[in-house]
Image (cartoon, grey):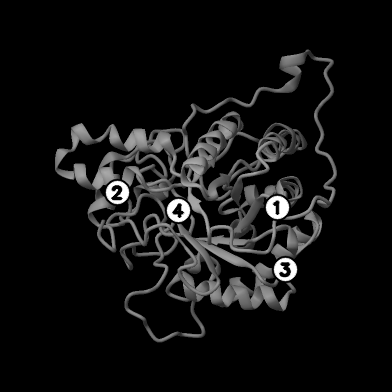
Amino acid sequence: MKLTMKHARVPVVGLTMLLGSCAATPKPVPITPATTPPAPAINPFADARLFVNPDYTKTVEGLVPAHPAEAELLKKLSVMPTAIWLSWIADTKDVPHYLDAALQQQKAAGKPVITTFVVYDLPNRDCNAAASAGELPATPEGEARYQRDYIDVIAAAFAAHPDQRIAAILEPDSVGNLITNLANPKCQTAEGIYKRGIAYAISKLSLPNVFLYIDAAHSGWLGWPKNLVKTAPVFKEILTMAGGPDRIRGFATDVSNYNPAKDPTNPKRDPHAAASDELGYIADLNKELEAAGITGKGFIVDTSRDGKAYIRTSPGNWCNIKGAGLGERPQAAPAPLIDAYLYVKVPGESDGTADAKAARFDQNCASDDATPGAPEAGKMFEPYLLDLLKNATPPL
């Protein structure tokens, strides 16, 4: 639902096909808890500027000639910071490019520039949805490639830029699927690999300049009391494998979703229901985490399309929801517990195709809430982008 397809999909080629039939089958390595010094327990966004992706700037500026009526809005969006999605192994080669660009912005600004990456390529990725399925199978070979060809490459690139701040959001939807979708055989198969994969990512990416945030779904998913009580034990299990809670800065919520950061209607809280906004969910989640010994954490909220509240018939609908608008602009420390509001989902990129004949078609992309005519996940969906701009709250 949040796939970035900057590159064409890279087929998974068996190692034996590359090296000959006698080549050894790759095996995942045991997870060794991180021993490098972790990033300091601070809000890394507080005194920094957010990286503006020059590639996204160019893409949005390129839409201006075709949409003169929205030219002013597009120009405003083109200079806003957005996250960079590492959705395929092929994307890892671009990490140095973005960090080099961020370094130039840092030199020009005379202050730290923080770059946010989304690490998103677990084997059997997004096990309960077809639109953003990944390239790696839920097998020992797939797990080994995730470690060696994906996480290790990212870790090396991060380590090569020790004087730059980096934020990394780890594996959207994964923990949410583990908590609520294990009735799906695909999620059952992926359960151990998901936990080990995230732990491995933490153990390798935990560096003094890298601030890690595990995805924690959203209020309409894990915010329900029956789901909320299951979250902290799963996070604790993963963090124990990785070396402990101090290896991460915190958690990210509402990634690629639509729940308001703050519900504009300010309803009376029902203790038997999920919070109606992300700030309420985060307060609830933080209590569960602290009770489990995971303390002092900060949170990121994705506000890239949460400007309009109550726009869908079900919180389970996620694909290109009609009526969405940009939410609060990216900013540091906007509320208690919140490290930053960020545009994590890149505005305008599709969640999945509306073409029922497509191989990656997911039925959710044809729901009554979904915008028709959507292209494949990660492709720019121009009409949708224009609606995000027009519906922005606060206005651009």
Q: Residue type at mark 1: give it.
A: Glu
**Label 1's element?**
helix
- Disc assigned to residue 233: 3
Q: Residue type at mark 3: give it.
A: Pro
Q: Residue type at mark 4: give it.
A: Ser
Distance of label 4 from label 3 (alpha carbons) = 24 Å
Instruction: Tell us which disc is closer to us: 2 or 3.
Output: 3
> Of marks 2 and 1, which one's residue comes earlier in the chain?
1
Mark 1 lies on residue:
191
Q: Position of residue 231 (x, y in %)?
A: 65, 68
> Of marks 4 and 2, which one's residue comes earlier in the chain?
4
Q: Is residue 223 above or below residue 45?
A: below
Question: Callout 4: few (<14), some (14-19), or many (20+) C-alpha neighbours within 10 Å?
Answer: many
Residue drawn where x is 66% and y is 50% of the image: 210
> Of marks 4 and 3, which one's residue comes earlier in the chain?
3
> Of marks 1 and 3, which one's residue comes earlier in the chain?
1
- Disc assigned to residue 217: none
User: With 195 as the anchor, is 103 left or right in this view?
Assistant: left
> Can residue 216 be seen from the camera position used here?
no
Question: Callout 2: few (<14), some (14-19), or many (20+) C-alpha neighbours within 10 Å?
Answer: many
Mark 4 lies on residue:
256
Distance of label 2 from label 1 (alpha carbons) = 32 Å
Residue drawn where x is 84% and y is 15% of the image: 22
- Disc assigned to residue 371: 2
Residue drawn where x is 42% and y is 55% of the image: 318
**Label 4's element?**
loop
